[in-house]
Amino acid sequence: MQVFFDFDGPILDCSVKYHNLYSELMKDEGLDVLSLEEYWEKKRDRWSEQSIVELTAPHGFFESYQKKRISLIEDVSRVGDDIMWPHVPTMLKQISQNHQLFLVTLRNRRETLMKQLESLGIKEHFLQVLNKDNNEGTYRTKVELIKPHLSQPSLIIGDTEVDVKAGQQLGMKTLAVSCGIRNEKHLSELQPDAILSSSSQIFDHID
Ligand SMILES: [Mg+2]
């Protein structure tokens, strides 16, 4: 079977990275910030970054905030804030023994991505790492990335509408994890084949 893994969500907990960046950019301007828990709960409930920022920032601030955020979020200095879920190395090793593993992500900077995978010690488990620099950030990008490599049966595991929609369009089995940037309510609206609390439950769904 082919297994396509999203990076942020099923493999990494990105909540600290996102919150650190938000806090820094807000505090630089002397603005109040939400706690990590409050911030992440809103992100998971699909609040836009702008709505969260404007809870405590004046109108008009978001434009400059967003420019800085985009330039920094994939900066190599930030990847240390990504936390790999503890079960991931063993899980990937085990799956890759009998299945073809792919990483498919909307991360833009391939060089940083490859360095991060190497430093996490999980690069070797993937047959291929699929991304596209300067991508449009929608499920269509994932469809384009996956399509040339696809043979059935296949599954995709991810934490957002991007992963579920791409998988549905390509006729793949779709697994959504609720430990990422969308809560269970939003994931269930997408009607994936299953919602898992963590990618560690993937073994129940691999043929
Ligand atoms: Mg993700």
Image: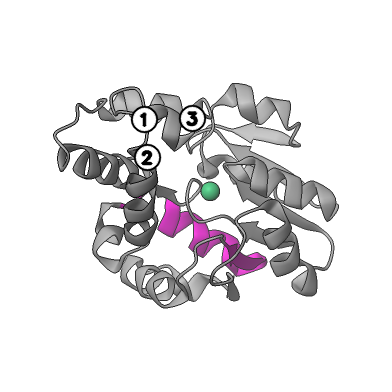
Which numbered disc flags the more N-terminal residue, 3 or 1?
Answer: 3
Residue 101 shown in magenta: yes
Which residue is at the front of the view, 197 or 149? 149
Kind of element beneath mark 3: helix
Q: Give coordinates of residue 7: x percent, y percent.
A: 50, 56
Q: Give coordinates of residue 67: x percent, y percent.
A: 37, 54
Q: Decide: is 27 above or below 101.
A: above
| Residues at discs 3 and 1 in contact (Cβ within 8 Å) | no
Q: Give coordinates of residue 16: x percent, y percent.
A: 29, 42
Q: Name the residue under label 2.
A: 62
| Residues at discs 1 and 2 in contact (Cβ within 8 Å) | yes
**Eye-nearest disc, 3 or 2:** 2
Task: Name which quarter of the figure residue 71 lies in.
Answer: bottom left
Task: Using a 10 Å C-alpha cutoff, classify the residue at mark 1 as few (fewer than 14 neighbours), some (14 to 19) or many (20 or more).
Answer: few
Residue 137 relative to residue 29: left or right = right
Going by the numbered disc 3, the residue's amino acid type is Arg
Residue 189 shown in magenta: no
Q: Give coordinates of residue 134: x percent, y percent.
A: 54, 69
Disc 2 residue lies near ligand 1 with CB under 8 A: no
Outermost residue to the front: 60
Going by the numbered disc 1, the residue's amino acid type is His
Identify the disc placed on residue 59. Answer: 1
Distance from label 1 to label 2 (Cα)? 7 Å
Going by the numbered disc 2, the residue's amino acid type is Phe
Q: Name the residue under label 3.
A: 44
Q: Decide: is 160 above or below 75.
A: above
Q: Which residue is drawn at 33% across and 46% down?
A: 65
Task: Using a 10 Å C-alpha cutoff, classify the residue at mark 3 as few (fewer than 14 neighbours), some (14 to 19) or many (20 or more).
Answer: many
Disc 3 residue lies near ligand 1 with CB under 8 A: no
Which numbered disc flags the more N-terminal residue, 3 or 2?
Answer: 3
Chain part drawn in magenta:
82-104
Task: Name which quarter of the figure residue 24 lies in.
Answer: top left
